Amino acid sequence: AIRMTQSPSSFSASTGDRVTITCRASQGISSYLAWYQQKPGKAPELLIYAASTLQSGVPSRFSGSGSGTDFTLTISCLQSEDFATYYCQQYNTYPRTFGQGTKVEIK
Amino acid sequence: EVQLLESGGGLVQPGGSLRLSCAASGFTFSSYAMNWVRQAPGKGLEWVSVISGSGGGSTYHADSVKGRFTISRDNSKNTLYLQMNSLRAEDTAVYYCAKDRSNGLGYTFDIWGQGTMVTVSS
């Protein structure tokens, strides 16, 4: 199975900050990567697919980049509603696998 | 409104069985692959299974559940199922059903249910 490793696992930030989360795949996955946001007690929500395509309805402050093995999720100007846990997911091969998550907390 | 509603979770003893259901509404259910994704308490997400759309003829399962769990669907009832046998403590999790965003097979998941909790314990 492809292992997805996110960094950091957690960090603190302030509203208005620009934040970047990294996801690395254990082997190349082309651009078959998605990002999800999950808030406590809620189901995940799809933010980005195909590494850089914004899901309909997702604010433009979210962006994704990368291909092959290295990917990033960037939030350009952190808002209060963005404090959550973020997961990357590869869909290049079965089984589909997620990163371990990155928790963004309020500083 | 597009909606997924899971049911069937509960407490079961190790070695027991449980069948989860996921009722879909607000979209053409038969046109999309459907998935189960689980999340153990305080842990991350784990993809479990996927089943193809109209015919439901293609399925894939995570290695951790292969041979024990079976995904199926009834397009006439707009319902997805997960039959779970030989349950283990490590299967304890919230189980989400999730719709494939496009016409892929377990690609990306744009609609999720609220989840149903499965607890395996004696």
Image (spheres, grey):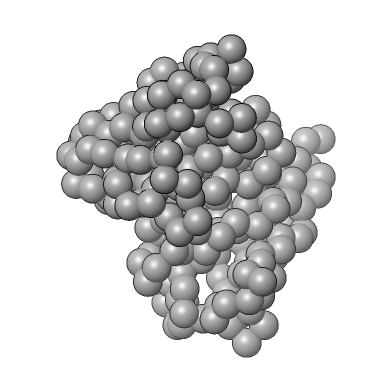
The quarter of the picture where the C terminus of chain A appears is top right
Q: Position of residue B4 (x, y in %)?
A: 66, 65
- Any part of residue A6 in sight: no
Q: Position of residue A23 (x, y in %)?
A: 33, 30
Q: Quadrant of residue B11?
A: top right
Q: Residue at x 50, y 24 (%)?
A: A16
Q: Spot the residue most to the bottom.
A: B76
Closer-to-camera residue (A79/A45): A79
The quarter of the picture where the N terminus of chain A appears is top left
Q: Residue at x 29, y 29 (%)?
A: A24
Q: Position of residue A103 (x, y in %)?
A: 54, 24
Query: Is A1 on the left or on the right of B41, as rendered?
Result: left
Q: Quadrant of residue B104?
A: bottom left
Q: Is residue A18 above or below residue A31?
A: above
- Any part of residue A52 in sight: yes
Query: Is B11 on the left or on the right of A85, as rendered?
Result: right
Q: Position of residue B83 (x, y in %)?
A: 63, 61
Q: Is residue B4 above or below residue A84?
A: below
Q: Residue at x 32, y 52 (%)?
A: A53
Q: Residue at x 45, y 59 (%)?
A: A56
Query: Is B107 on the left or on the right of A11, as rendered?
Result: left
